[in-house]
């Protein structure tokens, strides 16, 4: 396959840019060409800021030529889910409630990435305010994003465009948000890395909330090096998001190379008779376990302390209630502008009893402690991300199950850092995935283990075979 | 449940929300009630104190 710079990792693109062998202008132009050629089919972007991106690329090139290099992401193009405020650029949250909203400030994550020299390409498709029951929503103002590996297939959500854009060579890295799996699910569906940092690792200032107690901002990337670089830029408090903790930020990129020799990995393959992974997903888990064992990790079989159903139910009560609180005014005044998924969530959230919500918060504390206690036995958990690979849109019940039957709720609820890693393909060429999780604020261990998996399955082994709708340059 | 849901919607200014899908609204209320009832009740000994407000001292 001849090299297409649109599929370079962010880190490699950054290296070539500073070495002078790749111009940020060329890279951004290539991305914009692919966006123009593919977005009509994949519906990955809601808003593209081509002129601004080209201006930023020219500025980056001039800065670097003048010796002012901002860091490894300088000149590297990225995009953000359309729930991140971006100054002067409309932010729709995928909702008719927000179609005319143009913020006058940018989210902290966007500001930090731009200060690091990364170049914003545009705003990515999303479920309405990050809300969905796992279905495909055709009643929103923008068509649903499609999976680049098979455009008849589901992308997962709610960061639908963020997963698809990486896989399709339409950004070097993207930003999503995760409440109940919304970074990890699209990453799993689209065969890329999705990192949900610890709750409180990254500021959410300027990111439209879905559920205050659960929301996490994080990247979708091609490589662990990219995830490490982006997290290094994002991590740390900003004095505005009270949940963002003031804790040391290690060199995530450097610590990836430490390997897994001597690490103890808890493998969770059984979550009960109602949670059986598909044969493809089971094979992915077994292969990942074998890779880590061959790399020197000690594997131990482990179980989750509680049923997936309890983690999911507890998450739901908290999510419904807080989400209704966020959208209460619109629920009473403008529900006709909401899509059916958001409306359904408002209907559920409107009647959550305070006693039930508080019971869920107390249960959350216990469940979170139970997850953290696992790390007294092991350094890291390896388990499926989803029960099956991304299904066709036409298989409605499978589409719903892709979200509802994922294995992600325990870490959504507990706030532990978790990462979905692409783990090969099934017989139909759809990406398989595994999930890693570790102690609070120990993203370095997460990335170290993911890097060990990556050594046997490096990006870019394979790209989606997408026919561009215009002549390829 | 239907009368209760309709009265609930009226009391809380949610008539428009319910009007968009009355059956869905009523079903959602049942779903919420079932989920809430299934949520275990924990004692302080089991889970620690209920969510507390923690004022921060000046650095």
Image (cartoon, rainbow, N blue to C red):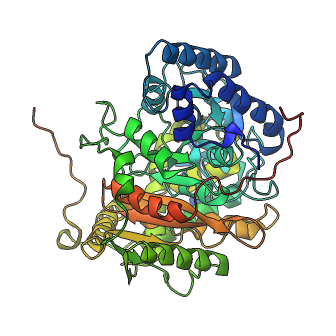
Visible in this render: residue A365?
yes
Residue A67, given in percent of the width and then of the height, sits at 44, 15
Q: In which quarter of the image is residue B23?
A: bottom right
The residue sitting at 58% across, 49% down in the picture is A222
In the picture provided, is A12 more to the left or to the right than A5? left
Looking at the picture, does residue A90 appear above or below residue A35? above
Q: Quadrant of the C terminus of chain A?
A: top right
Q: Quadrant of residue A154?
A: bottom right
Looking at the picture, does residue A244 appear above or below residue A73? below
**Foreground residue, A225 or A197?**
A225
**Foreground residue, A177 or A424?**
A424
Residue A282, given in percent of the width and then of the height, sits at 59, 79
Q: Quadrant of residue A165?
A: top right
Visible in this render: residue A309?
no
The residue sitting at 56% across, 28% down in the picture is A17
Looking at the picture, does residue A411 appear above or below residue A57? below
Looking at the picture, does residue A350 appear above or below residue A80? below
**Foreground residue, A126 or A362?**
A126
Residue A219, given in percent of the width and then of the height, sits at 50, 45
The residue sitting at 79% across, 63% down in the picture is A392
Residue A294, given in percent of the width and then of the height, sits at 45, 76
């Amino acid at each position: 396959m001849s090299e297409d710079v649109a599929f370079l990792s962010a880190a490699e693109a950054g290296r070539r840019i500073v070495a002078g062998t790749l111009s940020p202008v060329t890279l951004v132009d290539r991305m914009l060409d692919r966006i123009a050629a593919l977005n009509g089919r994949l519906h990955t972007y809601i808003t593209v800021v081509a002129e601004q991106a080209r201006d930023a690329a020219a500025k980056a090139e001039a800065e670097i030529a003048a010796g002012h290099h901002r860091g490894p992401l300088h000149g590297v193009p990225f995009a953000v889910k359309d729930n991140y405020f971006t100054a002067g650029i409309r932010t729709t949250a995928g909702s008719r409630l927000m179609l005319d909203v143009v913020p006058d400030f940018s989210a902290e994550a966007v500001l930090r990435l731009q200060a690091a020299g990364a170049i914003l390409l545009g705003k990515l498709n999303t479920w309405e305010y990050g809300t969905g029951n796992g279905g495909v929503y055709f009643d929103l103002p923008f068509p649903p994003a499609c999976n680049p590996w098979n455009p008849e297939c589901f992308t997962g959500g709610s960061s639908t465009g963020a997963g698809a854009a990486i896989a399709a060579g339409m950004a070097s890295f993207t930003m999503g948000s995760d409440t109940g799996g919304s970074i990890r699910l699209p990453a799993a569906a689209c065969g890329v890395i999705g990192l949900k940092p610890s709750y409180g690792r990254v500021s959410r200032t300027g990111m439209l909330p879905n559920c205050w107690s659960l929301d996490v901002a994080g990247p979708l990337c091609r490589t662990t090096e990219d995830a490490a670089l982006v997290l290094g830029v994002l991590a740390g408090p900003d004095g505005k998001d009270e949940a963002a903790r003031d804790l040391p930020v290690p060199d995530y990129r450097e610590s990836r190379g430490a390997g897994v020799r001597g690490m103890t990995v808890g493998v969770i393959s059984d979550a009960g008779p109602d949670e059986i992974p598909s044969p493809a997903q089971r094979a992915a888990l077994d292969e990942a376990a074998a890779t880590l064992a061959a790399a020197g990790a000690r594997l131990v079989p482990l179980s989750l302390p509680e049923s997936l159903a309890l983690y999911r139910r507890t998450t739901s009560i908290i999510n419904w209630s807080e989400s209704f609180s966020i959208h209460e005014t619109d629920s009473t005044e403008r529900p006709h502008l909401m899509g059916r998924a958001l409306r359904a969530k408002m209907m559920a959230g409107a009647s959550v009893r305070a006693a039930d919500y508080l019971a869920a918060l107390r249960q959350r504390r216990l469940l979170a402690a139970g997850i953290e206690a696992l790390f007294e036995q092991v350094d890291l958990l390896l388990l499926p991300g989803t029960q099956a690979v991304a299904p066709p849109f036409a298989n409605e019940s499978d589409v719903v199950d892709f979200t509802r039957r994922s294995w992600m709720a325990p870490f959504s609820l507990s706030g532990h850092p978790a990462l979905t890693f692409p783990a090969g393909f099934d017989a139909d060429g759809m990406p398989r995935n595994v999930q890693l999780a570790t102690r609070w604020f120990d993203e370095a261990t997460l990335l170290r283990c993911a890097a060990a998996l990556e050594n046997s399955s490096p990006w870019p082994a394979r790209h989606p075979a997408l026919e561009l709708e215009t002549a390829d340059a | 449940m239907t009368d209760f849901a309709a009265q609930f919607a009226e009391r809380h200014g949610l008539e428009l929300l319910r009007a968009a899908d009355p059956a869905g609204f009523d079903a959602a209320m049942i779903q919420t009630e079932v989920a809430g009832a299934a949520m275990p009740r924990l004692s302080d000994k089991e889970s620690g104190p209920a969510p507390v407000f923690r004022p921060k001292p000046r650095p």
